[in-house]
Image: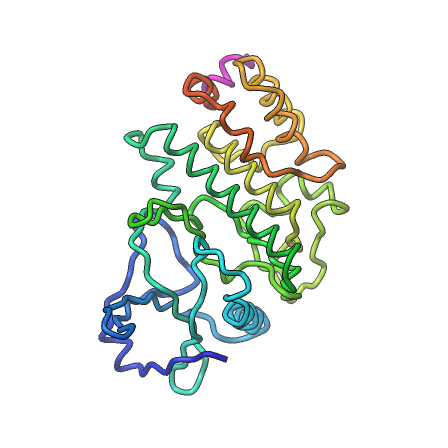
Amino acid sequence: MKTINISNKTLRKLDTYEIREINNFEAKLYLLPGKDKWHKTMNLVKIFYNTLGSTFSNKMYTINELIENSETINIEEISMPKKLVIINGEVSGYTQSFIENRNFKLILDDPNVSWIEKKNMFKQIGEILDRMKKIRENTNVKDFFLNDMHEANFILNTETQKINVVDIDSCKINGNRPFASKYLTPFSNISTMPFKYIQNHDINFNGYVVANENSDYYCYVIMVLNFLYGENISGMKTPEFYLYLNYLRSIGLSYKLLDRISKIYEYGDNENIKDYLDYITGDIIHKSKKKCFELRSK
């Protein structure tokens, strides 16, 4: 187990790190300067507010599994924990490398970023999912899924211009218990499909779904649809959902993409839609918004 001891006195002296316009109710973030041989480095320290109970124990197990398997996972675009942080003899959080970044959710909301750039970032997310699948297929880490996939848990690394995954401590790995996920809730249509989106019945843990490949692809599709629709579409009832897909077809979106999107509420397995995102054009994005759909539906 890799650890670092930080005193309360040292912690109080560290600069805090605030994520603009992104809510964070789980932990407080600090910046910790360091050195790697002769190079100066910067680490992000995540200290949890609640360090008691089964949920925190599950969190610590998850983080330790990520640290222990970091060389096996070896996906540069996933921001992995480095060390557990011990304060006054108690494990309270962890460190990871600090990345100069811009949050993906804020990018999607920014009209000054082109739709082509946004689409390419979505494709990068699909590529990360492909790499994770290869890890599951080719290593001993068979149980590894992002679980809490939503827009604010991705960032653009402004140095590499690559999309990175953050807040990985809520992932599914090596038999840990389920964590909550923004789009995997009993208020979405997945609640009627327990054979595909496996429901968690352990009341000691607040994750509604036991993450798997279908749930990761579901969240990915929801993110893309949110981008097109302009609002969160995960709570849309099934009839309206398919009405919206028909509307997207009427404005020119290819069946090749729509057929794969529609799978999220069908019996078969979901697919990674990254290779079909080029069917999305600027004209389709302009016409796909909620207000356009509602005007057509009246």
Q: Which residue is drawn at 73% across and 41% down?
A: 192
Colour basis = rainbow
Q: In this view, does 31 lie above or below 137?
A: below
Outermost bottom residue = 89
Image side of residue 24 versus residue 185, left or right: left
**Observer-nearest residue: 279 or 9?**
279
Q: Which residue is drawn at 51% across and 66% down?
A: 71
Q: Residue at x 59, y 26 (%)?
A: 257
For the magenta stretch, what is the residue range? Answer: 290-298
What predominant SS class does the magenta segment belong to? helix
Q: Position of residue 135 (x, y in %)?
A: 60, 56
**Magenta stretch containing residue 296, yes or no?**
yes
Numbered label tally:
0
**Observer-nearest residue: 79 or 240?**
79
Tell me the quadrant of the picture where the C terminus can be found: top right
Q: Which residue is drawn at 45% across and 58% down?
A: 167
**Observer-nearest residue: 204 or 156?**
156
**Magenta stretch containing residue 177, yes or no?**
no
Image side of residue 171 versus residue 85, left or right: right
Q: Is residue 257 above or below residue 143?
A: above
Q: Quadrant of residue 137?
A: bottom right
Q: In this view, does 70 lie above or below 227?
A: below
Q: Where is residue 277 in the image (x, y as percent from the top left)?
A: 51, 29
Q: Where is residue 161 in the image (x, y as percent from the top left)?
A: 33, 44
Q: Is residue 196 above or below residue 69?
A: above
Q: Where is residue 16 in the image (x, y as percent from the top left)?
A: 27, 65
